[in-house]
Image: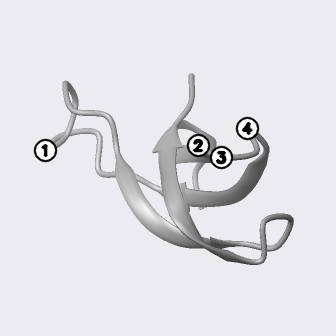
């Protein structure tokens, strides 16, 4: 994985960075990624948003 395609996903409930994923910069340059992911600190599926 290339470093420039990696994005951090932050849990909206506990505000911790729990996931790292890839993003296609050519297609989604303006839109921030939002995914439902499992947070191990909250112990449930929560909304995760892309951080800077």
> Are the residues at dot 2 and dot 4 in contact (C-beta closer than 8 Å)?
yes
Which quadrant of the view contains residue 31?
top left
Could you give the CA–CA distance between mark 1 and mark 3, rounded to whole angstroms?
A: 28 Å
Q: Nearer the viewer, mark 3 or mark 4?
A: 3
Q: Nearer the viewer, mark 1 or mark 3?
A: 3
Of callouts 4 and 1, the N-terminal one: 4
> Are the residues at dot 3 and dot 4 in contact (C-beta closer than 8 Å)?
yes
Report the residue marked by disc 4: 15
> Are the residues at dot 2 and dot 3 in contact (C-beta closer than 8 Å)?
yes
Report the residue marked by disc 1: 27
**Vertical order, 20 against 13 (above or below):** below
Could you give the CA–CA distance between mark 4 and mark 1, rounded to whole angstroms?
A: 27 Å
Could you give the CA–CA distance between mark 1 and mark 2, rounded to whole angstroms?
A: 24 Å
Other-residue count near label 2 (Cα within 10 Å), few / some / many at <14 / 14–19 / ≥20: few
Q: Nearer the viewer, mark 4 or mark 1?
A: 4
Report the residue marked by disc 3: 13
**Residue 6 in sight in this render:** yes
Q: Which residue is located at x 65 percent, y 57 percent?
A: 20
Of callouts 1 and 2, the N-terminal one: 2
Q: Position of residue 6 (x, y in %)?
A: 56, 47
Q: Which residue is located at x 29 percent, y 39 percent?
A: 25
Mark 2: which secondary structure? Answer: loop
**Residue 38 badge:** none
Could you give the CA–CA distance between mark 2 and mark 4, rounded to whole angstroms?
A: 5 Å
Q: Nearer the viewer, mark 1 or mark 2?
A: 2
Report the residue marked by disc 2: 12
Nearer to me, 33 or 29: 33
């Amino acid at each position: 994985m290339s470093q420039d395609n990696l994005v951090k996903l932050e849990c909206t409930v506990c505000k911790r960075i729990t996931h790292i994923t890839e993003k296609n910069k050519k297609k989604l340059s303006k839109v921030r990624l939002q995914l439902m992911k499992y947070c191990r600190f909250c112990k449930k599926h929560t909304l995760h948003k892309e951080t800077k």
